[in-house]
Amino acid sequence: MQTGSTPSLARHPDLAGRRVVVTGGLSGIGVATAGRFVAEGSRVVVLDVDAARAAAVEAELPGLAGIVSCDVADPAAVAAAFAEVDRLVGGVDVLVANAGISIRHRFLDITPEEWRRVLAVNLDGVFFCAREAARRMVAGGGGAILMTASTNGVVGHPFYADYNASKAGVILLARSMALELAPTVRVNAVCPGYVLTPMQQAEYTPEMLAATDAKIPLRRHARPDEVASLFAFLASDEGAYITGAAIPIDGGELAGGLASRDWIRPDLGLT
Ligand SMILES: NC(=O)c1ccc[n+]([C@@H]2O[C@H](COP(=O)([O-])OP(=O)(O)OC[C@H]3O[C@@H](n4cnc5c(N)ncnc54)[C@H](O)[C@@H]3O)[C@@H](O)[C@H]2O)c1
């Protein structure tokens, strides 16, 4: 039975030598994904806005081909960053457009500035990076574009209306791009549920973590490396027939509605 042990890496020999760009690759899901592709032998360039974390990630992942400082919400910065990617590794075979932000706030309190920033990073940023990558992939005759959406882009969640709208946009961007760019470039969105990143772990008390885990059918959060595994599979030749998909990796979160949550009711004897 698979529970929580760290899998051995390097499962996709065809990823060796591939030129991979990971945005938001200095933390959480992004750094796990960058590490997974490095382990596969890919040439990985990370784009991230958080320059302060660069040295630590460089030390953690000495096999990285480069870390480029870039705010994905700024199209000029994205163009410059991809020019730097060209200089470092000579093009792009795989893009993981993963950088994203969220703000917990009530819908009635969302300011226009907050709305704009969340949409700018999570949706505009994916568009800018995907366009740069797709131009290179179409010219080069192939490639895979992967986007980090969310279960929040599939069903509503309170207190994240702007974030949820941005992630729903990412899913339809992936599907539309997949149609236009087929058969040359595959485009897919991945929809993680609850992922226990180090920063999120720091925000939970043990009680909060246990209460959230209890609501998830598999009774635990995902590890960032489990999301990285899905990205590696989708980028590899094993994922060659998958395009235009929005794939949940959510421990069953989206599998059912209210009745599917009955196990959290001790009075029903189902715990
Ligand atoms: N953690 C979860 O439970 C979860 C669930 C579903 C989806 N996601 C999505 O996964 C992605 C990664 O999330 P995470 O939990 O690893 O978050 P994280 O905060 O640990 O990492 C996000 C990274 O993106 C970078 N970033 C933020 N704004 C940027 C910008 N404008 N330009 C470039 N880089 C920028 C940050 O510096 C950071 O390194 C996000 O798109 C998030 O919405 C996360």
Image (tube, rainbow, N blue to C red):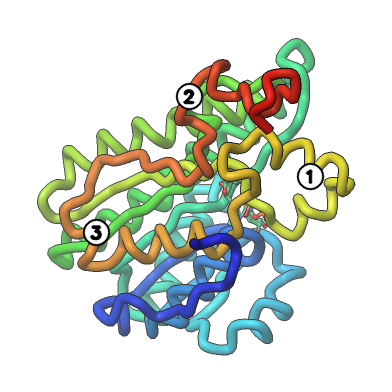
Residues packed near mark 2 inside 10 Å, few (<14), some (14 to 19) or many (20 plus): few
Label 2 or label 3, whichever lies nearer to me, is 2
Give the distance between the C-alpha atoms of the residues marked 1 and 3, in whole angstroms.
33 Å
Counting from the top left corner in percent of width and height, residue 97 is at 45, 53
N-terminal label among 2 and 1 = 1
Q: Which mark is residue 227?
A: none
**Residue drawn at x 41%, y 58% as measured from the top left:** 230
Q: Check if mark 1's residue and mark 3's residue have beta carbons within 8 Å.
A: no
Q: Secondary structure at mark 1?
A: helix
N-terminal label among 1 and 3 = 1
Amino acid type, callout 3: Gly
Amino acid type, callout 1: Leu
Q: Quadrant of residue 60?
A: bottom right
Give the distance between the C-alpha atoms of the residues marked 2 and 3, in whole angstroms.
26 Å
- The residue that mark 2 highlights is 256
Q: Which mark is residue 209?
A: 1
Q: Check if mark 2's residue and mark 3's residue have beta carbons within 8 Å.
A: no
Outermost residue, top side: 108
**Residue drawn at x 48%, y 73% as measured from the top left:** 36
Amino acid type, callout 2: Gly
Give the distance between the C-alpha atoms of the residues marked 2 and 1, in whole angstroms.
21 Å
Taking 259 as reference, is 35 above or below it?
below
- The residue that mark 3 highlights is 239
**Residue drawn at x 42%, y 65% as measured from the top left:** 82
Taking 258 as reference, is 171 above or below it?
below
Counting from the top left corner in percent of width and height, residue 72 is at 54, 51
